[in-house]
Image: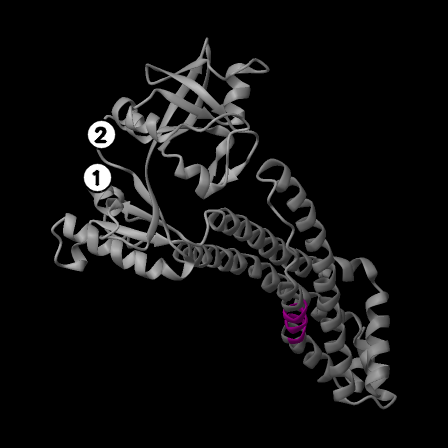
Amino acid sequence: MIFKHSLITALNGLKANKPRSALTILGIVIGVTAIILIMAIGAGAQNLILQQIRGLGSQTLIIQPGREPKGLSDFAAFLSDSLKEKDLLALQKKNNAPHLAEIMPEVVVYATISYQGEAKQATIIGASELLSRIADVYPDEGVFFSQDDIDSRASVVVIGSEIKKTLFGLSEALGQKVRIKGKDFRVVGVFGAKGQVSMFSLDEMAILPYTTAQEYLLGANYFNEIVARSTSEADVPLAVEEIRATLREAHNITDPDKDDFHIHTQTDIVQRVGVVTGVLTALLLSVAAISLVVGGIGIMNIMLVSVTERTREIGLRKALGATKKDILLQFLLEAVLLTALGGLAGVVVGATLSFLASLVLSRFVSSGWEFNFPFLAAVTGLLVSSLVGLIFGLYPARRAAEKTPIDALRYE
């Protein structure tokens, strides 16, 4: 019996009991669907995060207080107030950091912003006008506050579109006074709908001078971080070294292992995000792979049942001249075809669900969420599902091939 005839016989065997064949491959379909869905959503999430990070520009550096964290659970690394006004002044001196073009401190406060009985929880960012240039966002109404406002600790604020909608509705917001932590702030600017900007939702953010935020909201003289821009992308490494040298001198640090600050470049952050999302995706894939193993065991059981039910057929084929190899090939092809069809169905279902998920996520999470079909995962799913059929179908196929013609024909 040549391979072509074995293939036709295997297909006829599968067609003989279509409902059972369909139920048999269900585990494979679920497994491959889960793999495609996880890979597609994971890729979409990673691309969205990287877009947000790259939106700050490749020349941007972020200086944060505390030593370099050793892991996500190393909270102690973030509990530091080591970045202060003297550090900002030292970094602003051109002879200390000639490769820094601009620099801006930031303070972050989570508070309620209210107006005439309406209130909304918001992220309050204390910054300078540099934030507008780095993130490339400008008020659609009004203006951003100026350096004079920073120097005078002016009680002015620029609000996001969602804050404006909640507090003012369709009414005019410019010139009105909102209340944050018991102090009034005059609205000088309103952002249009911007969505996510560098991991923050600008629509639910209020921005005011960092000096004002320090004095009236935070009640502290330190910064949560300092954002800087190098003179060019090529000068980023030089800028990093200049920042380290300047801050170590300001903090009287002689041992680099005792740094009470750490610096992130956009490249560093991109790499960290890639590692984290890669680990999470691998973890989820390992869980999804269990479905393939369970499906393979199910196929082996069904194939054993099929071998028992078709014992007389096996005996008749052997009596007519079929060899052990022919019988082995026939049943092995049935198992591989089952799992391959299951893998193909899983790819189709997974791609469909991934596309629908991307539409939902782009609507409710971020408009920047894109559909990413993982071609590598699809090919891998097909290959692995076929391999599962080969591995788990081998034992039932050998059982069928080992039957003798006389005993098989006598089987009732």
In the image, taking residue 307 as reference, residue 168 lies left or right, namely left
Q: Earlier in the sequence, mark 1 or mark 2?
A: 1
Tag 2: amino acid: Ala
Q: Position of residue 379 (x, y in %)?
A: 66, 68
Q: Position of residue 165 (x, y in %)?
A: 55, 20
> For the point 52% across and 60% down, which residue is it?
286
Name above or below for residue 151 compared with residue 8. above
Q: Secondary structure at mark 1?
A: loop
What predominant SS class does the magenta segment belong to? helix
Q: Which residue is at 46% across, 8% downward?
A: 116
Quadrant location of the C terminus in the rendered image: bottom right
Report the side of 406 relative to 48 (left or right). Answer: right
From the image, tell me which residue sits under label 1.
81
Rounded to the nearest angstrom, the CA distance separating label 1 from label 2 is 9 Å
Residue at image mark 2:
220
Tell me the quadrant of the picture where the N terminus can be found. Answer: bottom right
Coloring applied to the structure: one colour
Amino acid type, callout 1: Asp
Q: Looking at the image, do the residues carrying marks 1 and 2 touch, with CB atoms under 8 Å apart? A: yes
Check residue 288 for magenta coloring: no
Locate residue 214: give its quadrant. top left
Q: Which mark is residue 155?
A: none
**Segment tinted magenta in the rendering:** 382-390
Q: Does residue 164 lie above or below 272 as drawn? A: above
289 displayed left or right of 345: left
Q: Please indicate, yes or no, whether residue 198 appears anywhere in the rendered image.
A: no
Under circle 2, the secondary element is loop
User: Which corner quadrant of the image does residue 296 belong to?
Assistant: bottom right
Find residue 367 and report its horizontal and vertical position in percent: 61, 40
Q: Considering depth in this image, is 163 or 20 the residue closer to the camera?
A: 163
From what the image shows, is residue 197 above or below residue 46?
A: above
Q: How many marks?
A: 2
